[in-house]
Image (tube, rainbow, N blue to C red):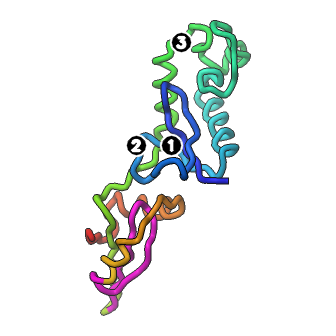
Amino acid sequence: RQLCVFQVRDGKPEVVHAGDMDFASALDLYGRYSSRTAALQALHELADTHVLCLAALGLEKLPPGRACFRAMLNRCQGVCCGRESPAEHAYRLQVALENLRIVTWPYAGAIALQERCDDLQQLHVVHNWCYLGSATTLTQARKLAKVAAGFDADGYKILCRPLLTGQVPIVQL
């Protein structure tokens, strides 16, 4: 079990594992799933919701030019048999995935989130959506910033909104 996401290549979403690429800096990644099985289940649900073709998504094998079973049930718009162009299907897939897009780390390096209460100050050091620790001085924070940081799904989930909306003071390290 390893964190997975989708990356669209040649119009088909592929499951990519965290060990194979840096999720914090790679472009056009979608979703966060605990396993390949969970990712494929989510893709099936996306296909159901957005009337996408399982064969075009790479989830089913079909002889070329033959309609899939879902097309006969009007649960696929027919990219598999020529009723819809591959470009239209790819566009609809992109629209379906957009809400799942992973935002790349928006800073050149590590940052510190400033937290102040009365005369106490804490600097919470974050890099690539990964929490590295807390410090009370900028010097300590800069030392923490040198620790290697990979993508952290929980950190991403917690930090994405406050960082991107400017809800918290940020210090570049």
Q: Is residue 165 above or below residue 92?
A: below
Residue position marked by numbered label 3 in the rendering: 84
Please provide percent x and percent y for residue 118: 32, 91
Please provide percent x and percent y for residue 139: 28, 83
Q: Residues within 10 Å of mark 3 (few under 14, many from 20)?
A: few
Residue position marked by numbered label 2 in the rendering: 27
Q: Secondary structure at mark 3?
A: loop
- Which of the marked residues, 3 or 2, is nearer the chain's N terminus? 2
Label 1 and label 2: CA atoms lie apart by: 9 Å
Amino acid type of the residue tagged 1 in the rendering: Tyr
Q: Is residue 104 above or below residue 28?
A: below
The residue positioned 53% from the left and 12% from the top of the image is: 84
Q: Residues within 10 Å of mark 2 (few under 14, many from 20)?
A: few
- Which of 171 and 72 lies nearest the eye of the viewer? 171
Q: Main secondary structure of the magenta part?
A: strand
Q: Secondary structure at mark 1?
A: strand
Tell me the quarter of the picture where residue 77 sits: top right
**What's drawn in magenta, residue-wise?**
120-139
Asked if labels 3 and 1 touch by Cβ distance under 8 angstroms, the answer is no
Label 3 and label 2: CA atoms lie apart by: 28 Å
Nearer to us of marks 1 and 3 is: 1
How many labels were placed on the picture?
3
Magenta stretch: residue 78 in it?
no
Q: Residues within 10 Å of mark 1 (few under 14, many from 20)?
A: many
- Which of 36 and 115 lies nearest the eye of the viewer? 36
Q: Which mark is residue 30?
A: 1
| Left or right placement of residue 159 versus residue 69 in this view | left
